[in-house]
Image (tube, helix red, strand yellow):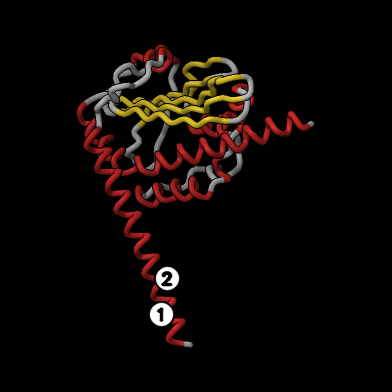
Amino acid sequence: MRHHTMTKSHRLGGALLGAAGLAVLSYAGYASATWARYGRRPRRAPADPLLDRFIPDYEVAERHELQVRAPADVTFLAARALDLSQSRIVRAIFAGRSLLMGAGPVPGDDKPAPLLDKVLALGWGILAEVPGRKVVFGAVTQPWNANVVFESLEPDAFAAFDRPGYAKIVWTLEAEAVDAVTSIARTETRVATTDPASRARFRRYWATVSPGVLLIRRRMLRLLRRDAERMWHAGRVH
């Protein structure tokens, strides 16, 4: 019996080590690919006049979307109200980034709050908005520092900003109508640096954190879909 238990323990340990090894290899592979393709614009990158106004030439572009069984206005409301602190995965990724970078805790970061409120409290600004459909956030920052500071600027000042030593970042929350009861939840991020030294620093940083950012974006959209569909179902039932 004891031998059988030990054998099961060894198998479990081996399976866990194998899973951990696969995760490390997957991370390393994605990070290496991110490094290699840095600065290469996707061949079929969709046009976005709002984003083009603020960062027409970019080094990083990440676009993610998910179909939602709810109208666009409901999906957009769910996006603005989304609480990412409810996700253990997202909390773990942020904690891992802090540990890796040696960062101190962000006040209130673990407290429940609507996504829009939390983003603005961190220092991001709203650069543009299509009421009920889309919002564009922007900030200038030095994300390679342990304790990141986001600085918001007025739209025209942001578009013209070129002070050396910074990265300009814009990202969106969007709900696009497919039909009366279906929509697409979408988020896009663009980054441009202001000088060669910042480009080199951000490239190293992005290769390190991009796997975590990918997971956060995917988890965010899944939570958004869940919340939007619950809101729509509750509205139809009641």
* 24 to the left or right of 123: left
Decide which of tag 1 and tag 2 comes sooner along the chain. Answer: 1
The residue at which mark 2 appears reads as 12
Q: Which residue is mark 1?
A: 7
Mark 1 lies on a secondary structure that is helix
Crowding at label 1, few (<14), some or many (≥20) Cα neighbours within 10 Å? few
From the top left corner, tell me how far across and down residue 105 is, in percent.
47, 47
Residue 166 in the image: above or below residue 212: above
Say which residue appears at 52% left-offset and 28% top-offset. 185
Left or right, 100 with respect to 187, comes to left
Instruction: Give the image quarter of residue 232.
Output: top right
C-alpha separation, residue under disc 1 versus residue under disc 2: 9 Å
Q: Residue drawn 32% across and 59% down?
A: 21
Q: Which amino acid does the dot numbered 1 rest on? A: Thr
Q: Position of residue 90 (x, y in %)?
A: 49, 45
Do tag 1 and tag 2 residues touch (Cβ < 8 Å)?
no
Seen from the viewer's position, the closer of residues 132 and 54 is: 132
For the C terminus, the quadrant is: top right
